[in-house]
Image (cartoon, rainbow, N blue to C red):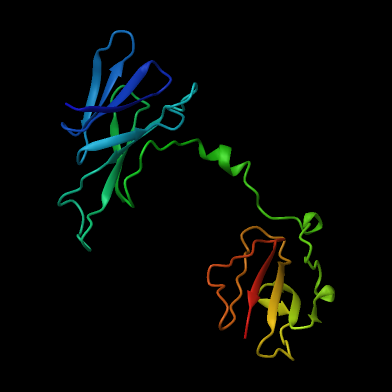
Amino acid sequence: LGPFHTEFDGQGNAYTTFFISSEVVKWKLGTWEVIDRKPTYYSVGHLMIPGGNSRKPFGKYVVAMNKITKDRYLPTGPEVTQSAQLYDISGEKMELLLDFPTVGEPHYAAGIAADIVTKNSRKIYKLEENKHEHAVKSEAEAKVVRKGNEVHVYMTMIRSHFAPDNIEGIEVGDKVYFHVTNLEQDYDVPHGISIIGANTSELLIMPGQTETFVWEP
């Protein structure tokens, strides 16, 4: 009862969620016969087959994105978490593999194979390709430049070492621009920087990247 969302596995089968009866139903295109049905917990909304909304679905798994959890998870506040369930659909019958809570209620999600992401993801920003106008590509280029009440700090960082690491002569009323370049050229070695009074708690500079922030003492 309550058909909601349908996607396809590329093998001539469709999968439809049913909100009222809380289930995923597998059925055959052309003959329209029901092949399998599995319960969900509870009141399932959208579902997602990686590539299932494309011309070439991957067709191995389906995720049911459920709306209501009722008493299924530990209550930690006024809002109860939503949930999802991962099914193996590579065989004739669906098999539940994983049942897990989610943050929020995903709508019409899409998925792709992991190797499409991994082989195309950037690992580092090459220093020689850094075109930031304030980039410094070696510690020897690090410097502090004053222009009236503007101070420009051209800084490098590598393995928690900052250069320059001692900046003197800053006065109240100055506006200090930190142009920070992460000299790392290894994968997964980002760096942050903290200065009392500067809003940099979310600043994360990737390998080979330059970012600028402003501090006013």
Q: Is residue 75 left or right of residue 13?
A: left
The residue at 20%/38% (across/down) is 43
The residue at 62%/46% (across/down) is 121
Task: Pinpoint residue 184: horizontal percent, then vertical percent.
Answer: 71, 65
- Say which of 144 and 87 sits in front: 144
Is residue 43 depicted above or below 72 in this figure? above
The residue at 19%/41% (across/down) is 42
The residue at 38%/15% (across/down) is 12
Please identify the quarter of the rendering in which residue 209 is found.
bottom right
- The single residue placed furthest to the right in the displayed view is 140
Which quadrant of the figure contains the N terminus? top left
Is residue 111 depicted above or below 58 in this figure? below
Please identify the quarter of the rendering in which residue 30 is found.
top left
Task: Pinpoint residue 63: horizontal percent, then vertical percent.
Answer: 34, 37
- Report the label total: 0
- Say which of 98 and 75 sits in front: 75
Which quadrant of the figure contains the C terminus? bottom right
Please identify the quarter of the rendering in which residue 14 is found.
top left
Is residue 25 depicted above or below 98 in this figure? above
Is residue 68 depicted above or below 110 in this figure? below
Task: Pinpoint residue 84: horizontal percent, then vertical percent.
Answer: 30, 43
Q: Is residue 203 left or right of residue 209?
A: left
Task: Pinpoint residue 86: horizontal percent, then vertical percent.
Answer: 33, 39
